[in-house]
């Protein structure tokens, strides 16, 4: 990995890590805020933007795993990628079950551990952020089946167009009323496009934007930036209006599977590409981003614990205007989680967990 290191991926990893932390920071008070107020609109805007981080993580994985020039045998793929993510999922699932017990004030008795930890490994999904691990593991399982097909640009474009239309655009559109809506509902109810759904679309999008980045001209890049910014603005406005219409928080636009998120995430990814020259301009800058990127996985795993610590100290987004509290708490959470990760990376046994 060190020999194949791609500098701009480090920058995108850092951005994605911060955005994923922001997802959960901005979600702290969003359901309790008055939807007519300015605080809700600001919080909703941060939350909409933050979901691009989830897509970016998947895009980086796809860009790395689907590269035509990178050979990886089935055994290596299953043991070093798929199996590792599943093992980490169950280890961290058990850890956070203990955290949840302590959070509720429960005692760690043998019976409680058996029921709330051991049985939970099979019966429960796990702490709210851990779903990402089995999801990415299953995507890696699909790599040998799809890699050769997605080595062709036309097939990538075909898949991405169908993915965008069936998994993003139409589901987003169906949240609103328009003429002949129910004909479209009947068509999609009767026909299953599941094969083109899920996070595989973002997996392929990352590969496409990386593998053919030489074809992204300045004009196309600027167009994508404008489209991404307009889509983000549309998501903020529509999300706030939807919430006001129903009198409660509406999450239609707060998901990686909103059509708007697709273009916002793509714009952020391409922006990271264009900044690669600045990262590699000096060995010091490159080293800093390499270090930060190396802590991002640990930040993802540990940030809920950091949020619990801040909450116990009375530090939440309700302390002041969300325009300040959300960015500040996001940065503080990321920094605390990053420091904890850096410490764990120095311990031989524990470094494998982050």
Image (cartoon, grey):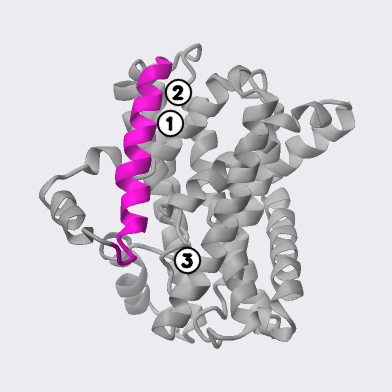
Relative to 168, say whether 146 is above or below: above
Residue 170 in the magenta stretch? The answer is: yes
Residue 146, image x, y percentages: 32, 23
Q: Earlier in the sequence, mark 1 or mark 2?
A: 2
* Residue that mark 3 sits on: 96
Question: Of residues 76 and 256, which is closer to you in this image?
Answer: 256
Of the numbered discs in the image, which one, if any, rests on residue 111? none
Q: Single out the mark in the foreground, 1 or 2.
A: 1
Relative to 206, say whether 267 is above or below: below
> How far apart are the two marked residues, 3 and 1, measured between alpha carbons?
31 Å
Which class describes the residues within 10 Å of circle 2: few (<14), some (14-19), or many (20+)? many
Quadrant for residue 28, please give it: bottom right
Residue 11 in the magenta stretch? The answer is: no
Relative to 151, say whether 120 is above or below: below
Residue interval drawn in magenta:
152-178
Residue 241, image x, y percentages: 49, 74
Question: Of residues 98 and 17, which is closer to you in this image?
Answer: 17
Question: Of residues 232 and 251, which is closer to you in this image?
Answer: 232
Tell me if I can see residue 122 in this picture.
Answer: yes
Of the numbered discs in the image, which one, if any, rests on residue 66? 2
Quadrant for residue 293, please give it: top right
Residue contact at pointers 1 and 2, CB within 8 angstroms = yes
Residue 335, image x, y percentages: 75, 59
């Amino acid at each position: 990995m060190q020999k194949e290191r791609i500098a701009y991926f480090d920058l995108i990893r850092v951005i994605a890590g911060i955005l994923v932390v922001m997802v959960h920071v901005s979600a702290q008070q969003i359901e309790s805020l008055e939807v007519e107020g300015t605080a809700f609109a600001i919080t909703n805007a941060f939350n909409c933007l933050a979901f691009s981080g989830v897509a970016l993580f998947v895009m980086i994985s796809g860009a790395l795993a689907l590269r035509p020039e990178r050979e990886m045998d089935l055994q290596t793929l299953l043991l070093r990628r798929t199996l590792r993510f599943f093992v980490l999922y169950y280890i961290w699932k058990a850890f956070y079950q203990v955290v949840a017990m302590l959070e509720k004030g429960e005692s760690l008795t043998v019976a409680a551990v058996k029921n709330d930890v051991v049985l939970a490994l099979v019966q429960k999904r796990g702490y709210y952020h851990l779903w990402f691990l089995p999801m990415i593991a299953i995507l890696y399982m699909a790599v040998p089946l799809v890699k050769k097909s997605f080595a062709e640009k036309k097939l990538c474009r075909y898949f991405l167009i169908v993915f965008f239309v069936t998994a993003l655009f139409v589901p987003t559109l169906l949240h609103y009323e328009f003429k002949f809506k129910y004909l479209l509902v009947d068509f999609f109810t009767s026909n299953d496009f599941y094969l083109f759904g899920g996070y595989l679309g973002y997996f392929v999008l990352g590969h496409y934007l990386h593998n053919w980045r030489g074809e992204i001209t300045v004009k196309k890049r600027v167009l994508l930036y404008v489209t991404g910014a307009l889509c983000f603005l549309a998501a903020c406005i529509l999300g706030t209006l939807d919430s006001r219409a129903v009198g409660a928080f509406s999450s239609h636009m707060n998901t990686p599977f909103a059509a708007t998120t697709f273009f916002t995430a793509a714009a952020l990814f391409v922006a990271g590409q264009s900044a690669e020259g600045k990262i590699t301009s000096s060995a010091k800058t490159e080293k800093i981003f390499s270090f930060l990127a190396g802590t991002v996985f640990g930040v993802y795993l540990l940030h809920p614990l950091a949020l619990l610590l801040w909450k116990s100290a009375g530090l939440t987004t309700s302390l002041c205007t969300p325009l300040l509290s959300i960015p500040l708490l996001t940065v503080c959470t990321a920094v605390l989680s990053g420091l904890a990760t850096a410490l764990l990376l120095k311990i031989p046994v524990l470094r494998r967990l982050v």
